[in-house]
Image (tube, rainbow, N blue to C red):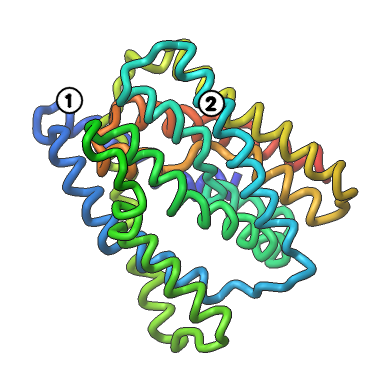
Amino acid sequence: MDALVRFAPILLLFLLGVALRRAGIARTEHGDRLLAVVVWVGLPALVLATITRISLEPALALLPLAAIFTILVTAPVVIGLGRALRLPRRTLGAFVIGPLIMNPAVEYPFVLMAWGDAGVAHLALFDLGNAVLVLTAVYGLAHWFGSEAGERSRPLRRVATFPPAWAFVIALVLNLTGVGLPHAAAGVLLEIGRWVVFLVIVAMGIYFDVRLVGSGTLLLAAAVRIGVGGLLGALWILAFDLEGMTRNVVLLGTLAPAGFNTVVFAARENLDRAFASSLASLSVLLGLLYIPLLLVVLE
């Protein structure tokens, strides 16, 4: 119950965005401006504060590798499904990137309550592998689907100008070299990132289209994120005979809802914002139902 209470602000911010849109106060371009602040300020601050603090132990390498494996194998599946559905290109882009972007952030409060700091540390390592591909390859895919024909040869250049990607590289270098950030600076960046990233939720409400919630295409995308992801997580566990906390976190991580970055990338690369927002919203709402049940089963 405490974890659900923690998510009340997320629901309220989402409803605020919906209300602003319905009242005619906010339009799509306002959501774009909010997400620009997230891209240039919120995400870089959060990435710098979190990645520099993670303990990178070789023995736990299977956690980030599980996330990377899940994204790489899911990609051809979701691209094939999207093309078979003959979706418009910008909707296809949102359909593809949504299932590839896992959202372990939704799971942290539940994991903290169930497994304590050790569980959070394991989940953070899984999330590191997720971030490696999401901020590079998946963002490159978003650019490719959202750009015009003459611009599709420049995804690497687009990734190189994506502020969170730069923050990730800097944070990883600081971590691996043992330099780190001063404790006070990391704390300030963490608070800035946490607060600014909440703007994503307001933007989701602005973009949200309730007419899409019952869409078969939307439900299929959510099913791929959860179903295919969970299946690949189970295969990874069996392949490496994982046990205990590592096993639990791999399964929980691969079953994570679609990430908020689906909306961020859609806005930045001119994909179908309404589809991206509706997918992220529906996926997170489903996650709030099945994540607690999954934790009970794993216990």
| Residue at screen point 79% across, 55% down | 246
| Residue at screen point 38% across, 68% down | 167
| Residue at screen point 72% across, 63% down | 61
Q: Which residue is mark 2?
A: 78
Give the crowd class for mark 2: few <14, some 14-19, many >=20 residues within 10 Å: many
- Mark 2 residue type: Val
Label 1 vs label 2: CA separation?
32 Å
Quadrant containing the N terminus is top right
Observer able to see residue 27? yes
Q: Is residue 184 above or below residue 121?
A: below
Q: Secondary structure at mark 1?
A: helix
Mark 1 / mark 2, whichever is N-terminal: 1
Residue 11: x %, y % from top left: 39, 38
Residue 188: x %, y % from top left: 36, 77
| Residue at screen point 50% across, 42% down | 101
Nearest the eye: 132 or 148: 148
Q: Which residue is mark 1?
A: 22
